[in-house]
Image (cartoon, grey):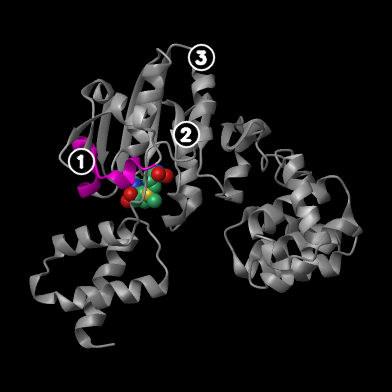
Amino acid sequence: MSQVNSKLERQVESILLKHKLKVSERTLKRFLNFLESIIDELTPELIEIFVLDNLTIGESYFFRDRKVFDFLKKVMQYKVEWNILSVGCSRGEEVYSLSIIARESGRNCKITGIDISPQRIEEARRGCYKFWSVRFLSEDELERFFIKNDDKFCIKSDYKANVTFVSGNFLTVPFSESFDIIFARRVLLYAENEELVVRKIYSLLKNDGVLVLGSGEYFPTVLKDFEPINECPCVYKKVSRKSSKFSDEKHVKDKRPKTSFISTQEVKYLKEAIAKNLENELALEPTIRIVEHCLENKILSEAENYLAILVRKYPTHYLVWKYLGVLELEKGNYEAAEKHLKKAAFLNHSDDEIWQLLHFIKGRK
Ligand SMILES: C[S@@+](CC[C@H](N)C(=O)[O-])C[C@H]1O[C@@H](n2cnc3c(N)ncnc32)[C@H](O)[C@@H]1O
């Protein structure tokens, strides 16, 4: 790497560090090459803006994961006043989608959106979108919620009432209120330390509050203090610290993530895929869920079959080694369990559960 590039690299890395963001090495390399091509135009402020706008992806659209909004519409019937926070709100699509359902449900809803990119927040305040952001709405919805302005769809002012946008890093911006619902969809993946984000969300949520993640997102850290809601698996309810998964040090084995949220349909699909030997169709996240389901219900031979396939397909994923460890623990093979769990800890040292299981084994040997 050239002199210029290494100086730039240090600058970019310190910005990432300052905002506690992470990016892959490949993305960083591509980005540095791009910056180098416009090096003469760059100021430190501009580099920071480029980092925030280019190293995080602002992709969003109205009513993303529609079933979540349908579910919340039902939940909103339970009370009149709602305070909602959207973390990583990008250009505001999620915030206005919430404003729309609140208004349609006749509820008083205060919604705050925060994003680390000042440019996206500016666009959110404007509330005018290209077709791409509204592509899944019906003609009727487009008519009801937007005013067409040339090729842009601008949200009607009704839906802007009670909506606030904040530009800044969720981890450092102070909030003086608590929330009923916090959205953090496709945001944890950018966090250098996702646990810090989850802890802040926990502290800002009211006791009966819920956290909404993106569909298909899976972060074991979340399961320490939140439980997925059966009806809508990407919605998690806050559990009190007393009954939180890691509060009772004595029963380490009981601290595995609760898995009751796996649907019978999902179990059926995965079992059929295994039976047909469709290895390539086995995505990691749902298969891990079925493994958890099998371990929870002591169907050890089935868990072993799934893990045998997963370890061939995802040999470097820590969850595979973690559950191989749990399986051996269930069978009473402490040595083998320890070996697998050490591998898991090597691949992801920030999963507390792995360390606690290792601690548990140490106490047994
Ligand atoms: C992929 S978008 C997700 C948008 C929306 N939540 C959704 O799911 O449709 C992720 C957004 O999170 C923002 N972001 C990432 N880390 C953040 C942080 N620590 N604080 C605030 N915003 C953050 C990025 O700037 C980006 O706009």
First of labels 2, 1 by sequence position: 1
Image position, residue 348 (x, y; %)? 59, 64
First of labels 3, 2 by sequence position: 3
Farthest residue toward the front?
A: 139
239 is higher (above) or lower (below) than 331:
above
On the rendered image, what quadrant is the C terminus found in?
bottom right
Residue designated by label 1: 152
Range covered by the magenta-colored residues: 118-135
Farthest residue toward the bottom?
A: 2
Q: Nearer the viewer, residue 171 or 37?
A: 37
Q: Tell me the SS state at disc 1.
A: strand
Residue designated by label 3: 77
Q: Residue at x 49, y 42 (%)?
A: 199
Q: Residue at x 68, y 58 (%)?
A: 354
Q: As shown in the figure, which amino acid type bears the numbered disc 2?
A: Ser
Magenta span dominant secondary structure:
helix
Q: Residues within 10 Å of mark 1 (few under 14, many from 20)?
A: some
Measured in 3D between alpha carbons, the distance from the residue under mark 3 to the one under mark 1, in whole angstroms, is: 33 Å
Q: Tell me the SS state at disc 3.
A: helix
Whether residue 153 is visible to the viewer of this picture, yes or no, is yes
